[in-house]
Amino acid sequence: MSRIISRLSWAQGRRKKPAGPISPLFRASQQEFRNLREALTEYHLGVTLYARAFLTDEAAHHACGNTSGLLSNIQKQMRRQIIEEIFGEFREPLMELQRTLWDCDLEAARHQVTALYDQMFSEEEEKEHSCA
């Protein structure tokens, strides 16, 4: 199971009439919700990813007035951290798959692709918390 699935947070919100965009995961139209006369309980499931950086006055001073260049580099590093957090766990299996393909072992590659797919899209966490 992907690491990101373990970081999903579930929260129950307050009762209210839905307003704004509806999740694209649901096929109900916005019009169906406009006609509701009662409030519904809102639920949230999601992940928040962020990276933080702190810049000292001394570091800004050493940038010789080019803080925009320094901030651009910091932003690139922070983006890389988030990408690594999301996809980094799949680096090793992908490298193994690449080596297997270079060796032209298609049967082993097929098994590795299946294992990687299962690792990426496993719903083990969801099944453990299922109400059914």
Image: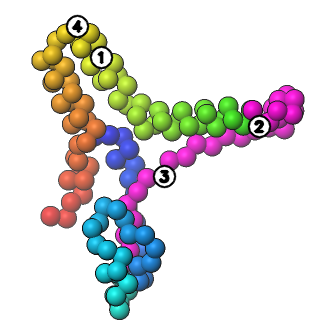
Amino acid found under the numbered disc labelled 1: Gln
x 37%, y 60%: residue = 45
Q: Residue 48: percent from the left, percent from the top?
A: 48, 52
Secondary structure beneath dot 4 equals loop
Sequence-first tag of 2 and 4? 2
Is residue 67 found left or right of 95 in the rendered image?
Answer: right
Q: Write down the region rendered in magenta.
A: 41-69
Where the N terminus falls, by quadrant? top left
Q: Residue 88: percent from the left, percent from the top?
A: 42, 30
Q: Which-is-in-front pick, marks 3 and 2?
A: 2
Q: Cβ–Cβ below 8 Å for labels 2 and 1?
A: no
x 37%, y 65%: residue = 23
Q: Which mark is residue 118?
A: none
Q: Cβ–Cβ below 8 Å for labels 3 and 2?
A: no
Amino acid found under the numbered disc labelled 4: Asp
Write down the residue under mark 3.
48
Q: Residues within 10 Å of mark 1 (few under 14, many from 20)?
A: some
Q: Which-is-in-front pick, marks 1 and 3?
A: 1
Asked where in the image residue 102 lies, by quadrant, the reply is: top left
Sequence-first tag of 1 and 3? 3
Sequence-first tag of 3 and 2? 3
Residue, far left:
107
Q: CA distance from mark 2 to mark 1?
A: 38 Å
Write down the residue under mark 4.
103
Which residue is more in the foreground, 27 or 115?
Answer: 27
